[in-house]
Image (cartoon, grey):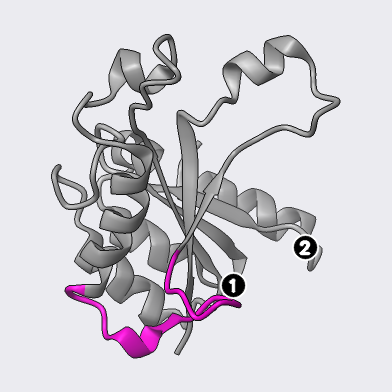
């Protein structure tokens, strides 16, 4: 689904609780220009997943994050940008990070390194601090203790996020 498809669906439903998430990893496949796709979403955009074209360290691939952050500021996006990727953890030898990720890159490298990378071209004032004064917050995706064994196997700490609040 392209950003145009998602916006058309959002507009057709026309409900304040329905919006669009743009994921730069997938948009890299579907969109000709991710920044323009982001701009086109305007009022429909509710969440952003920032991921490099290979789900590695932000800035190490060809996704144009400076242009995407500029587009977010132009449309006055005031929501979370979640850094997403696959890092490797020695405790998870059969994880997706071990299969697809760079074994020298940890989940923390992707989360905190991504936040530091974004701050190199985005004014610090556009990043809101979290509840403990941090710019980005490492949040492993863990299921509740009642989750199924299969789900726990799929959603281990090999996929994670670092949430950064973008504001004006």
Viewed as shown, does residue 97 lie left or right of 122?
right
Q: Residue at coordinates 59% horizontally, 25% vertically from top-left?
A: 155
Residue 14's label in the rendered image is 2
Viewed as shown, does residue 155 lie left or right of 83?
right
Outermost front residue: 91
Evaluate if marks 2 and 1 touch, with contact meaning CB atoms under 8 Å apart. Answer: no
Where on the picture, by quarter, is residue 40? Answer: bottom left
Number of marks present in the image shown: 2
Q: Is residue 7 magenta?
A: no
- Where 50 falls versus 96 (above or below)? below
Secondary structure beneath label 1: helix
Q: Position of residue 127 (x, y in %)?
A: 41, 80
The magenta region covers: 120-136
Circle 1 Cα neighbour tier, 10 Å, few/some/many (<14 / 14–19 / ≥20): some
The residue closer to the viewer here, 19 or 63, is: 63
The residue closer to the viewer here, 88 or 121, is: 88
């Amino acid at each position: 689904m392209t950003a145009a498809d998602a916006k058309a669906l959002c507009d057709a439903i026309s409900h304040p609780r329905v919006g669009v998430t743009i994921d730069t990893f997938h948009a890299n496949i579907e969109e000709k220009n991710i920044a323009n796709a982001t701009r086109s979403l305007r009022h429909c955009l509710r969440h952003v997943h920032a991921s490099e074209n290979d789900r590695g360290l932000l800035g190490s691939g060809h996704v144009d994050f400076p242009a995407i952050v500029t587009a977010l500021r132009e449309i006055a996006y005031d929501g979370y940008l979640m850094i997403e990727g696959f890092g490797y953890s020695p405790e998870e030898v059969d994880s997706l990070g071990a299969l697809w990720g760079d074994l020298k890159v940890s989940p923390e490298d992707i989360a905190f390194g991504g936040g530091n990378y974004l701050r190199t071209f985005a004014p610090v004032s556009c990043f809101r601090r979290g509840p403990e004064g941090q710019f980005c917050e490492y949040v492993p995706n863990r299921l509740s203790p009642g989750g199924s064994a299969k789900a726990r196997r799929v959603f281990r700490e090999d996929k994670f996020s670092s949430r950064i609040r973008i504001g004006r």
